[in-house]
Image (cartoon, rainbow, N blue to C red):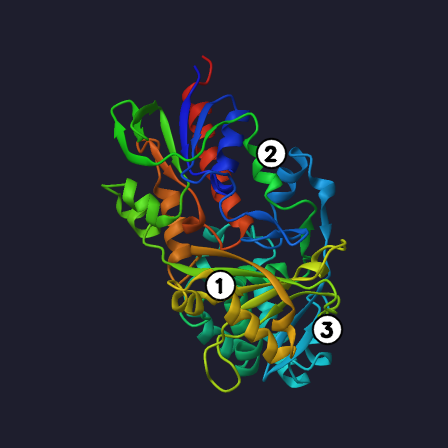
Amino acid sequence: MVHRVIVIGAGMAGLAAATSLRDAGWQVCVVERETQVGGRVHSAAFHGRVIECGAQFPSTGYRHMPALLERAGLATQAVPTSPWAAFERDGRLHRVHPNRPATLVGGGLLRWHEALRLALGTAPSLRRTRRLDASSYAAFAALDDEDADDWCRRACGHAAASRFFEPMVHGLYFHPLRGASRALLEALMTFRSAQTLAVRGGWQALPRRMARGLDVRTGCHVESLVQTPHGVRARVGGDRIDADWAVLATPAPAARSLVLDPTPEEAAVLDAGYARAMHVALGMHADWPLPPELRGMHGLIFGPHRHDGAPTLVASMVVESERLAQEGPPVLCAMLGDTAALRHAASSDETVAREVAQWLDTHWPGASARVTDHRIQRWSEAEPLSPAGRARAAQHYRRQWSPARRIILCGDHLGLPWTDGAVETGLWAAHRLEVWAADTFLPG
């Protein structure tokens, strides 16, 4: 018997579920609202380069992505990028190497006693989490019991909280440290010895290759999804699609609009909020020399407030020429976090680009005059928020889901806010369906 499944959403969670089910012999139909696959894994040609406009860097700490890259024939295209990053403190950039804790002191971000407090405070966490899947948020449910800011200041000290963890969460996930869960930080620290990667030709090559061999229908709006006595029925662009199962792999707001009578467990995970973000790519004149402090630096991290207390405009910045060694004029890509993206929600692309270019002048005088091109990508649901309780809700949903419910959820609202976290939820959903099919149709 061939099982039919409709996968709603062709981001990384949906494609991971779809390819796993296809390989298990299921008949899979994938529908996607956008005109291309990949979700927030989105690459674009700009200013003589291919840049990442959504998710930025794969990591050697990912558990599930390496197998996907291997199967897609892209493993050799994922190469280490520069390991150096910089954190801003009091208007100055401080170089940090993630695998060399001493650079927190050597680069001037922390003093010795502050770094020691950080090391002692995080040591128990490293022991607690070393056997956990760093991309399964449900695996961290037992640690989902305290506000991240409170935990940081108590365990690691005020300096580490305000100069290291707070900028990191703001720069990478676009929301404040306060209001997030300790579980998010415990998961994040499992990447301590990992290295950032870059994908030659653009990371979106992965979802595009995953979509090959699948029945993927892009540009399709799903109007409704209902469970029937024998499966599910979806209305897609006026057409009806009947299937035995539905894998709902969209961000929480879209999923909420389709699950009209959610179970308590579904309602809890679909209550997830999001931080918005804006990716601002600035193409520089070919003769603009890259400032010395940016050379060999793949990314810069900025806290939510400037040293004078005003909100920051830019949460993080990627130096594209330092991501991969390739010919071409410099490109600087700034990410605006939730507060700045909300402030500029109604601003034109030109206004946003001009303000970010002027921000460059505060660090590298005269840089704005050398900007020759820009590209803006707006993300209304850039990263899921991770308040205390979300990991426990994800774990509870997974434990309570049963095959009597013909709709199964996956996506960022069930996972950690990095791409491998979304992939893990898709693989989990596919595995649950595959196990059900195997148990139901055992011979004899």
Residue 209, which numbered label? Answer: 2
The first of marks 3 and 2 along the sequence is 2
Mark number for residue 224?
A: none
Circles 3 and 2: CB distance less than 8 Å?
Answer: no
Label 3 residue SS:
loop
In the rendered image, the residue lying farthest to the bottom is 308
Of all residues shown, which one is farthest toward the left? 261
The answer to whether 254 is drawn above or below residue 163 in the figure is above
- Name the kind of residue labelled 3 in the image: Pro
Quadrant the C terminus occupies: top left
Task: Name the N-terminal-most of marks 1 and 3.
Answer: 3
From the viewer's perspective, tell me whether residue 223 is left or right of residue 60. Answer: left
Assess disc 3: are there few (<14), some (14-19) or many (≥20) residues with their C-alpha within 10 Å of its C-alpha: few
Can you see residue 174?
A: no
Residue 350, label in figure: 1
Q: Name the secondary structure under disc 1.
A: helix
